[in-house]
Amino acid sequence: MFRHSQLESVKASLAHPAHAAMPLHARIQRAIRQLILDGTLGPGKPLPASRALARSLGVSRDTVESAYARLHAESFIERRVGSGSFVAEMPEFTPGHRRSMRDALLRNQAPNLSRRGNAMFRSGGVSEMLLPRPFAHGVPETRSFPLALWERLERQVLKEAGTQALLHGDPQGTPALRRAIADYVNLERGARATADRVLVLTSSQQAMTLCANMLFDPGDRIIIEDPAYYGARKAFDAAGLDCVPVRVDRQGIVIEQIMDDPRPTKAVFLTPSHQFPTGATLSLDRRLALIEWASRNQAWIIEDDYDSEFHYAGKPTACVQGLDPYDRTIYIGTFTKSLFPGLRIGYVVLPPQLVKPMAVARTLLDGHTASIAQLTLARFMEGGHFGAHVRTMRGVYSRRLGVLAELVRTHLSEFVEPRVPVGGLQMPCVLICDLSERVAIDAARRVGVELLGLSALHADGDGRPGFLMGFAAYTPDELEVAVRKLAKALRTATG
Amino acid sequence: MFRHSQLESVKASLAHPAHAAMPLHARIQRAIRQLILDGTLGPGKPLPASRALARSLGVSRDTVESAYARLHAESFIERRVGSGSFVAEMPEFTPGHRRSMRDALLRNQAPNLSRRGNAMFRSGGVSEMLLPRPFAHGVPETRSFPLALWERLERQVLKEAGTQALLHGDPQGTPALRRAIADYVNLERGARATADRVLVLTSSQQAMTLCANMLFDPGDRIIIEDPAYYGARKAFDAAGLDCVPVRVDRQGIVIEQIMDDPRPTKAVFLTPSHQFPTGATLSLDRRLALIEWASRNQAWIIEDDYDSEFHYAGKPTACVQGLDPYDRTIYIGTFTKSLFPGLRIGYVVLPPQLVKPMAVARTLLDGHTASIAQLTLARFMEGGHFGAHVRTMRGVYSRRLGVLAELVRTHLSEFVEPRVPVGGLQMPCVLICDLSERVAIDAARRVGVELLGLSALHADGDGRPGFLMGFAAYTPDELEVAVRKLAKALRTATG
């Protein structure tokens, strides 16, 4: 009782590779449901007898019966004893259905995003390279990560905790991990943290989004560095904040403009260890001045200490949080750079009065961080493996920075001047030739070399042209191959 | 050259248990830094000779020298050859420092949250029991989870992927997991999903927050069920949406009020499989009517199918997303209930035009979901273990629901009437005695029994009094012990 086209449509659906994982009866059920939904089989129309349909489709009668039984359970069809199965009458569902469907499809083409949704979409987000190649920035070396040790510790942890590790975790973070983080930042970064002031998150990006939404209303002024870390800038823009860029020099952000500005300002966002992208370290007197400013103005200091572990020249300066007696500083840390990006664990050290509000808000965002990873990381830190890994990688990265600086001086001296940083995972270079930044970056990309342009990181988009070269994730040989490729590409672009 | 009180302060800091993990020199450095920061040691003041201080503290001279060297590197002290060490002169840092510190501490007492921050804090968030006890709701049984199998699959995955699993992942989710999810929802839930329409998140809570922010502006109207799932309601409130509650009956949300309302409405939020908290299944005709309504009004249907895996009576109805030919439905799923809460993996199946905007926005929220867990889950699903686990647990939970219903009828018939649901992880009961809901819940809590009150889930806060009893995570024996305790507690409260 199916028309030929209807039968063909069911057969096509059965054979469709997308449905290969489904049992036959489910595929038949689905195909007939679709005929009903798109109006091909109208209300009251009879369905073929199961035996006849089974024969047409080359399947057993039981299979068709099973499909009909499901369609009946879903109320798509009615079954009348002695007279067979019929498409059910359904309200709100038949007249003009196909026309309204086509109209809807046409109207649908522009996604209806909210204003903030549009702003977030247009920002382009924070994209990361899945398989980093030179000189993608901000990526640590993961190929030498002690994965076997990590797996062993995870097995230990699961043996001890058993299926308790599967339950919901403390939204503030596993206590053992919070203790390990507090000890680490106190010892290595001169912070003033306690376990009950640490909030474990999934990333420093989540920390920025959380701060942006919890502390500031749309339109609030927040000072950012100029040039600035794009992930922070985009998080603040998405929250509707008024970002005020302030120039960075070799001592970090220039404080006079901040001190002298009479307009109410809610916060300053800093990357004080190795400013992104310049690599400058914020000087102690500026740190102290900003702390006093924040206290006087009841402003927050958001300190993103994202790759502070990797400092190569001289002692690292104590973090702002540890210098701040007024509890105006929110310290952001992450294991993305110091361990591996796929881990998804970051954290904040909060002023006491913000702990409870931030932890509550976090439950509304996404609950809490995955438990097994937290327990494993706590064990990794408690056992001294984190300290050891960071020390090893600091040596590796320091040597790679030296290699890259030397390679740039040897092969690229006619094009760029390297600005060798005291730490971090990337080196800025300023262009000293006639090439535009855009041309240089495009030429590099054509030969498979990644560069992040510097000028777009400036507030007005026209800072000194140049690019950032990530070096941490690449061996000296890989760095050399890429520098030689880059030199050739730039030479071709010039000529 | 330290005053006695200064020396005592350094000694106290050295002995403080919070600093036990730090090396001695770091503790001394920190203690002296604090004296400088709080103004006890003013600019230009001499520090004791290292030998003298070492003697006073009972440490080696090298230790003190090392502390001084770090303080010097941090610019806190100056070292003059032949005359010793002095506190450095620092701008912006001395006069009135202690007074401004005290003032700041006083002002600090009220945390300065934003309006949305305050709203999120005041909502109380979504709190979960860390060690669930009867009758905490929404918790699956994790004690019988095949953890050894899960660990074995993770080892396999890591052996194959190696340290590649440590890198940044696709912000939309690991392709293998997206394929497995699409196959699963198509087969089991009658969805129309493809891997490229799946976005992997950390939880259904994150899905709701993402939708609330990406699709709606503050003040936009969104229809929610009445009574409603509190986590959704709080996520929408936090985004500033105007939530319009619409009554639920035994067929799910009542659609007339929605159809007849002339005011522009942006979306409806549904828990159609087993409505939270009533357990009602949304009927097919209402599903179809809502789909037509959404298409006509260019509104979204947000379908939270959070525990649809656990349907005990009759066939589950196909999800709204699979019935919707207009792509107006956003389907939310989670592994929190079907596997374990600590996993932190949820997902959405999106209309094609929303995939890119949502994935981009997600990178601004928190990047992506942890890679190793995604790969392991994909393998678990591909191997058929997910289907097998869900089938096993469906049997377990169905029996537990039967046991609980029987226990309630036997022991609590004078107090409540159970409303046995067709699926889900909890059973609502309405109070039929003189006890108020508050008194009943408090009496239960005093004997260690958890109940979630029903009336607070109603928009006006005064729905029919009763409570929700979670049953999935507790053995029949545990259920019986708790029901007996509850009966005794309610009897005492009545008497």
Image (cartoon, coloured by chain):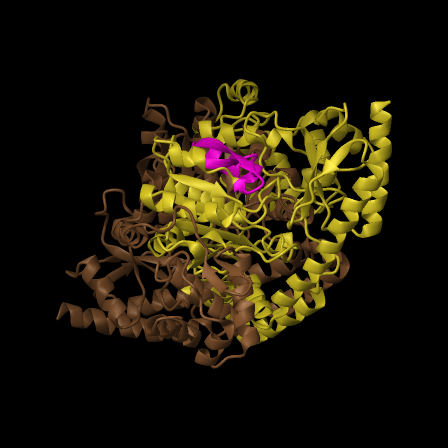
Chain colours: A brown, B yellow
Query: Which image quarter holds the N terminus of chain A?
Result: bottom left
Q: Quadrant of residue B52?
A: top right
Residue that appears at 84% across and 41% down: B410
**Relative to B260, is B468 on the left or the right?**
right
**How far across and down, in percent of the image, does residue B84 sit?**
57, 38
Q: Which residues are magenta?
A: B223-252
Q: Let me know if residue B251 is in the magenta part.
A: yes
Q: Write the residue at 33% across / 54% down.
A: B353
> Along the horizontal axis of the image, is A202 left or right of A429?
right
Quarter occupied by the C terminus of chain A: bottom left
Residue B168 can be seen in this image: no
- Is residue B156 shown above or below A390? below
Q: Residue furthest front?
A: A82
Q: Is residue B318 left or right of residue A165?
A: left
Q: Residue B57: horizontal and vertical position, in percent? A: 73, 38
Asked if residue B433 lies in the magenta stretch, the reply is: no
